[in-house]
Image (cartoon, grey):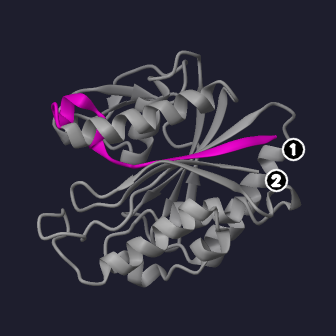
Amino acid sequence: MLTSAVLVPSAPLLVPELSGDSAESAQVRAAATTAVRRLAHEAVHWVGVGVDSEKAAGEHWRSGVGRGQIGTFAGFGADVRTSLDADAAGEPVPSLELCALVAGWLRGRTDVEITVDMHVVSAKASANECREFGQQLRKQLDSDNRPQGLLIVADGASTLTAKAPGSFDERAAGVQSAIDDALTAGDPEALLALDPQLCRSVGAQGRAAWQVLAGAFTGSSRSAHPRATVDYSDAPFGVGYHVGTWRP
């Protein structure tokens, strides 16, 4: 049974070895760590959802990503290793998706043994495809009598300022505002109304993961009006980051 969904950024800056002692990074990190620790005391099995922008449109999502594998942030500047389950072994997999690395790193910040079943959605998946996948996940979660957590790993627009990774796009602020409002209000329909092409244009790759979240909260009468709380919502480096929780 789904207990709650925790929303965190898909950002390497969460890892101190990659971001140094930046105060802005520390704020995001503290919020995300606190949120996943709460989730860990509600459920020791998590279903993770992130976005892979490199996958072809024909492959809408992949399941079991990173299962039994060791990941590393070496490609981002430091050989910080992560895993999604306690049985992970072998040499690090350099190609493991960033969202899976972040999920594994956050898993390691909890004080209980967590298993994360990671799903990666294509950034090209349509809103309807994301909704359907979210509804499928919800059925799976609610069919298990054990407490189940949902971990959404996603970023907002990456073009909010001139120094942002994607430079500046004047449309980004409006898109980010719509995302922030929907996540803060716990509004699945508002998330599903986000335009995939516009989101992609302003670098909001997390759109697909958030629309999967929306599907998970529209596929059950128990979640008609999710209760949303916000731990962090800001764009310190020109990228929209959100940490919060949705509860059925």
Q: How many labels does the image show?
A: 2
Q: Can residue 60 be seen in this view?
A: no
Q: Which residue is drawn at 40% across and 83% down?
A: 198
Check residue 2 for magenta coloring: yes
Q: Where is residue 96 in the image (x, y as percent from the top left)?
A: 38, 42
Q: Residue at x 18, y 64 (%)?
A: 164
Q: Is residue 213 left or right of residue 107?
A: right
Of residue 35 and residue 200, the one placed in the foreground of this image is: 35
Q: Which residue is drawn at 16% across and 31% down?
A: 21
Q: Where is residue 171 in the image (x, y as percent from the top left)?
A: 30, 84
Q: Is residue 231 above or below residue 207?
A: above
Whole-angstrom CA distance, mark 1 to mark 2, is 6 Å
Contact, CB < 8 Å: mark 1 with mark 2?
A: yes
Q: What residue type is labelled 1?
A: Ser
Q: Mark 2 points at which residue?
A: 139
Q: What residue type is labelled 2?
A: Lys
**Neighbour class for label 2 at 10 Å: few (<14), some, many (≥20)?**
some
Residue reaching furthest to the left: 163
Q: Mark 1 points at which residue?
A: 143
Q: Position of residue 31 (x, y in %)?
A: 42, 38
Residue range in magenta is 1-22
